[in-house]
Amino acid sequence: MLRSKSEGVLSKAGWVMAFSAALLVGCGGGGGGDSPSSSAGSAGSSNLQSVGAMPANDLEAHRFLTQATFGPTSPDITRVKAIGYERWIDEQLATPLQNSHLATVEASSTAQGTDRPMVNDVIYSWWTHAVTDPAQLRQRVAFALSEIFVVSTTNAELTGDGRMVASYMDMLSNKIDGNYRDLLEGVALHPAMGTFLSHKGNRKEDTNTGRIADENFAREVMQLFSIGLVELNDDGTNKLVNGLPQETYTADDVKGLAKVFTGWSWFRPAAKASVVWWQCFWRGDQCTDASQSITAMSSYTQEHSISEKRFLGVTVAAQTTPNPQASLVAALDRLANHPNAAPFFAKQLIQRLVTSNPSPSYVQRVTAAFRASNGNIKGTVKAVLLDAEARDMTLQGAASFGKVREPLVRVIHLMRAIPHTSDAYNAALTSGRVPYYLASSTDDTVSELGQTPMRAPSVFNFFRPGYKPPQTDLGNQDLVAPEMQITNETSVLGYANYVIQMVDYGWGHTNSQTQRIDMRFDLSSFDSLVDKPTAIAPQQLVTAVAQRLLGGPASSELNALMLTGVGKMPNVNATDRRRRVESAILMVAVSPQFIVQQ
């Protein structure tokens, strides 16, 4: 049951809105409007916004920043209005990271008396970077990539090696500067992925024992990371032959590709060159080094298959001398240049940043940009965010445009929009150390978010890009809503309960130094709005909170609910007035207008 110091408000208003969010039948939350396909067709011949395109007002800037960051802030809005969309993107992608994830997990681990970062340190780092890093676009895109090229701390080895996971997160962020082929290689050779999908230590086949190469990564690198299950047109739609989709690969392709990924294992430092090879392959006592968790895997010819490798129309001839690097290059080149790679990646990036159901023409334009730039990640991101369909304000009312924002993104948005403090973060800054938040796991669906960063339940992420909620108008219209896969009555109430905790008490771990919850909102900026006469006429408070969180006015329905809820609350003293502010924030945070990005 929902609980709050502000009794009655959520049960009468917020609960209704939160529950409606769980039952959305379209990403737009209902309503009419043309589909993105028809709207895109009316946008004229210009596919991208002009180089000098500027947001017309705060609302347009806020909408753009909702797609491109973890949440708009007033300085961000001012900046994008001053220099325009494209210059802002270029500026962001040139902005250096505040700190690396690796530096952050090492700092938090050291501060807590250990030299071995664990999964909690990864959580601290993710929240810290998502909220505070000025390089917001890079952080947002890196998070999108982490939900495509998934590794998860549900894996026991990764749970115990926070440096490895942090290094993987840094790798994704750094590869934004390169192209898709570079990214694919970084993913394939990172020890975190090798651990998660078991191709680290993958051994060649042995006809005497019947051993075959591990096929796990070979299967997933095709299905999830590069070409998908069925052949695609450049607009992301399925290629049909006699009305039927065509599979992209066969079991034989998996077997052939699996041989490519034999003989790759732990990094072998130069200082260990004289150590017998198998000690390094298995990370034995004689070949253990801290760099192995954060450095790309090394190849070991002794365990690389020399037999012929056939996959996706490519043949790597049988090798007299094992050559794992040559096999790898052939495989990654084929995957990166496969006709499916461009639309497969383009559509998923659009889904993660802008809308769950992009029109075919939108996907085709981003696919073309991907191909024209040889898979340049920055160029592809720019094509996604500057496309006419992404920037068309008239699509805000289209029922098929937009996306449900996942719980983590919603909560980080709240933190970026509303001033807050963190004792751990402030203490680290004061002492000149790398700062971090004492964030906690948020796995629980009853009282938390049902989602913890870098902790997806499987390689298929928290949700599938093609998920269609069953028995809904959305599914009946053949529209997808990936984030709805983790949205149900329980999770909606869990999210609402978590926001209640945030505004009432704070969130994260209890700080051992201060003996209080580490993160707390500072709502003093709203003080003037809860003094009389605003307390008598709460519209000013409702308007201010909506402007801060939504970038503009609340819908008429939300506005009326907020006025009713806040207006019925006691208004005798400062505590009462503070609860009015908390309740106004809460009602926006659980509303479909906040949860659904359009």
Image (cartoon, grey):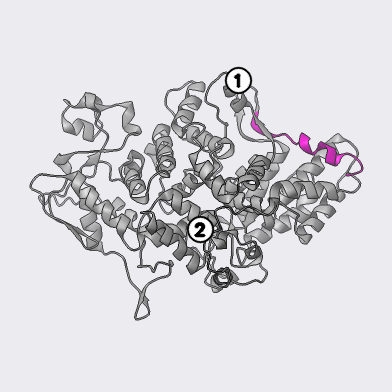
Highlighted range, magenta = 517-534
Query: Splitting the image into 4 quarters, where does residue 6 fall?
Result: top right
Q: Is mark 1 on a helix, strand or loop?
A: helix
Image quarter hosting the C terminus: bottom right
Residue 421 percent across, percent down from the top left: 66, 31
Q: From the viewer's perspective, is 366 left or right of 510?
A: left
Q: From the viewer's perspective, is 57 left or right of 147?
A: right
Looking at the rendered structure, the kind of residue marked 1 is Thr
Say whether residue 355 is visible. Answer: yes
Residue plotted at (88% across, 44% down) = 534
- Name above or below for residue 13 compared with residue 151: below
Residue 412 percent across, percent down from the top left: 60, 43
Looking at this rendering, what residue extends furthest in the top direction? Answer: 431
Magenta span includes 206: no
Name which of mark 1 and mark 2 comes first in the sequence.
2
Magenta span includes 525: yes
Residue 8 percent across, percent down from the top left: 80, 50
Looking at the rendered structure, the kind of residue marked 2 is Gln
Per the image, the residue denoted by label 1 is 430
Mark 2 nearby-residue class (10 Å; few <14, some 14–19, many ≥20): many
Query: Splitting the image into 4 quarters, where does residue 354 fall?
Result: bottom right
Query: Splitting the image into 4 quarters, where does residue 420 fall?
Result: top right
Looking at this rendering, what residue extends furthest in the left direction? Answer: 320
Per the image, the residue denoted by label 2 is 351
Residue plotted at (68% across, 42% down) = 74
Residue 275 percent across, percent down from the top left: 17, 26
Q: From the viewer's perspective, is 241 left or right of 511?
A: left
Q: Is mark 2 on a helix, strand or loop?
A: helix
